[in-house]
Amino acid sequence: MQSAKNQLEKKDILARQAVSDRQEAEALLNQERIRTRTISHELETIRAESQSKLKFRGIETLSLQAIQAYLSKLKSFHAPADDLLTAYLPSGTRLSGVISEKVLERVEEENLTLLDRLETETGIVLFYDIHRMICEAIAPSFPVTSSSWQLGDSFEVSLLEEILNKDYRMLVLVLHAGESFIGFAPDARVFDTEELIRSSVKEKHSKGGFSQRRFERLREEDIAHHMDKVIEALDRVLEENKLIDCVILSGDFQLIGEIRKRLPFNLEIIEKPSDIRVEKSGGEEILRTVLSSRRYLL
């Protein structure tokens, strides 16, 4: 009888000890979970801060002539192993959605972040050396239409050369309040038709109150009158040139929105940066600017 009682007491002690050990283990586990969540949050914060500080090593504009010389140099670059990655990404396409996961792992995360920031109307072409001797992207003057990639001992530049050398029949509009430009180039080499449209548009008003509201209304009327003249000229150019491959727009965002409504739906439209100033540029310089590409050093 005493033996059975001793055994029950021992079991009771062991049970209480097991409960105590379990509670201690759960407490330690909760502490580790909290610590893990804290570290994960800190890592996410550090990653977000580092990504926000990431910048391109350089950005430059390449004229048609300059990019031909650039591609010639790229073609001369060779690697003893398949270390040179070329990727063609249409607008809105990410590298992660095109290349294999195995190859993607060989591209630095910082470079992927920079690539994802590039939102260009014409897409990008990536030239990336796995050993990071060459890490850059080109936003060409005309659109990349399909995605593709290659990992080899040289860069694939022939597709980009085809894009740049194609003779687009293009309509160019540079739109600013009071001074706009319309030009038609039948072969992406020289304008066959060009027209400068000027109107008197009041400068922006800096004062407040009723005076400003009245001034702004008059300015809006001036801009509307200017756009009427632009649309009249546009209709004339469209009537004279039935075959157009693409329309290149640059200038004031709101004016671009208005002119888009007047363009045929079947035309491909490309928006270019708004830093083209009509009053400081002739037709030849405007054409050279819209045919230029952007180079981004990662």
Image: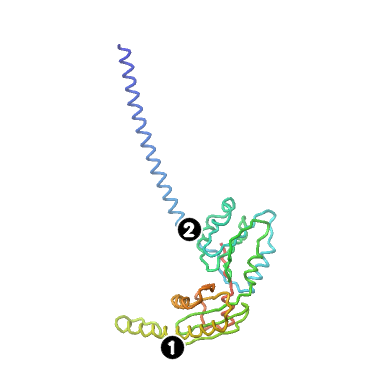
Q: Are marks 2 and 1 in contact (CB under 8 Å)?
A: no
Question: Could you tell me how far apart the alpha carbons at marks 2 and 1 are, in whole angstroms?
Answer: 46 Å
Q: How many other residues sit within 10 Å of disc 2, few (<14), some (14-19) or many (≥20)?
A: some
Q: Quarter holding the C terminus?
A: bottom right
Checking the image for residue 51, the label placed there is 2
Nearer to me, 215 or 246: 246
Find residue 217 and report its horizontal and vertical position in percent. 35, 83
User: What secondary structure is found at the residue carrying circle 1?
Assistant: loop
Nearer to us in this view, 139 or 48: 139
**Please, which colouring scheme is shown?**
rainbow
Q: Residue at x 62, y 81 (%)?
A: 190
On-image quarter of the N terminus: top left
Q: Which residue is mark 1?
A: 200
| Disc number placed over residue 148 in the picture, else none | none
Side of 172 where 202 appears, left or right: left
Q: Which residue type does callout 2 highlight?
A: Gln
* Residue 162 sits in quarter: bottom right
Q: Is residue 227 above or below residue 165?
A: below
**Of the residues tagged 2 and 1, which is closer to the observer?**
1
